[in-house]
Image: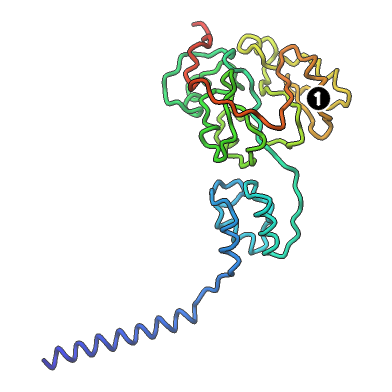
Amino acid sequence: MTAIFAAIITISGLGLLFGLGLAVGSRVFAVHLDPRLEQIEELLPQLNCGACGYGGCADYARALLNGECEPNVCPIASPEARARIAELLGRLLEEEEKLEARIFCRGGYDAVRRYDYEGLPTCAAANQIEGGVIACDYGCLRYYTCREVCPFDAIRIDDRGNPVVIPEKCRACRLCVQHCPRGIIRIVPSHSRVDILCSSRAKGKTVVKVCSVGCIGCGKCVKECPVEAITLEDNLAVIDYEKCINCGKCIEVCPRGIIEKIEEKEKNRPVAGDNRGLSSVPVLPG
């Protein structure tokens, strides 16, 4: 019995000693967190998309507290949230130009396919074999990965099977840009309401063979622009947004109808069916 009591006393003593050690250690080595950190994290969208350049919202919040970046770096946070974060940090919030994603392709069902595709219905998969299912090397594959990854439901499918960004919903998070294997989605200033929605840099003869609306580099829009905002770059007409006055004169002279006036508010029309598979599109012979 004496041995049992001795063991109990020893274990109890060690427990008390270790407990005191932990209590002292917790005070000596305590990490004091800035109470603003939790407040900032609550104001962030918690999507962890990486659009800010950090690993997630928590990393971005810590970077804000350390003075490594500004409150307007996150493109997804609401203006109210940014203003509140700036207030918590005691900083002046700099106004930035609003941006939005834009998809530079309007080939639709008229774009020719290289072959019938029955594989995984994602853009990355449809782009793997022989340069991609669409014969135009710069055309939208139309398996709508961009729509699937958009956290704001900001991409609709028009009546010709093209993914189109809804400007008022887009937060320029760049997720669609990152997931497009053709690189035809770009972030542009929201004030630009006229754009040439094609990405093909192939010569006109090649474009005509694979797409009925692709830019052929004819240069008519370049000559018509009253402010010299359009130039030809590698067979593709490109608009300088800083110069463009959104007059729309280029739209009137484009023989391919690829220059469009981007509406301030898109009608969110539903998809007529899924539009995947593109069975009605012609396939290149042989």
Residue 242: percent from left, percent from top: 82, 35
Q: How many labels does the image show?
A: 1
Residue 145 vertical position relative to residue 39 in the rendered view, above or below: above
Measured as percent of width and height from the top left, residue 177 is found at 60, 35
Left or right: where does residue 223 sit relative to residue 234?
right
Q: Residues within 10 Å of mark 1 (few under 14, many from 20)?
A: many
Q: Position of residue 56 (x, y in %)?
A: 55, 52
Q: Which residue appears farthest toward the bottom when viewing the image?
A: 2
Q: Is residue 203 above or below residue 180?
A: above
Residue 99 point in image, percent of width and height: 70, 40
Q: What amino acid type should be assigned to the residue bearing mark 1?
A: Ile
Picture quadrant of residue 266: top right
For image coordinates 84% across by 30% down, the residue present is: 245
Quarter holding the N terminus is bottom left
Residue at point 52% right, 14% down? 114
Mark 1 sits on what residue?
230
| Residue plotted at (56% across, 54% down) | 57
Q: Is residue 15 left or right of residue 144?
A: left
Residue 209 or residue 175, whichever sits in front:
175
At 51% across and 9% down in the image, what residue appears?
Answer: 283
Describe the element under mark 1 as helix, strand or loop.
strand
Residue 214 in the image: above or below residue 146: above
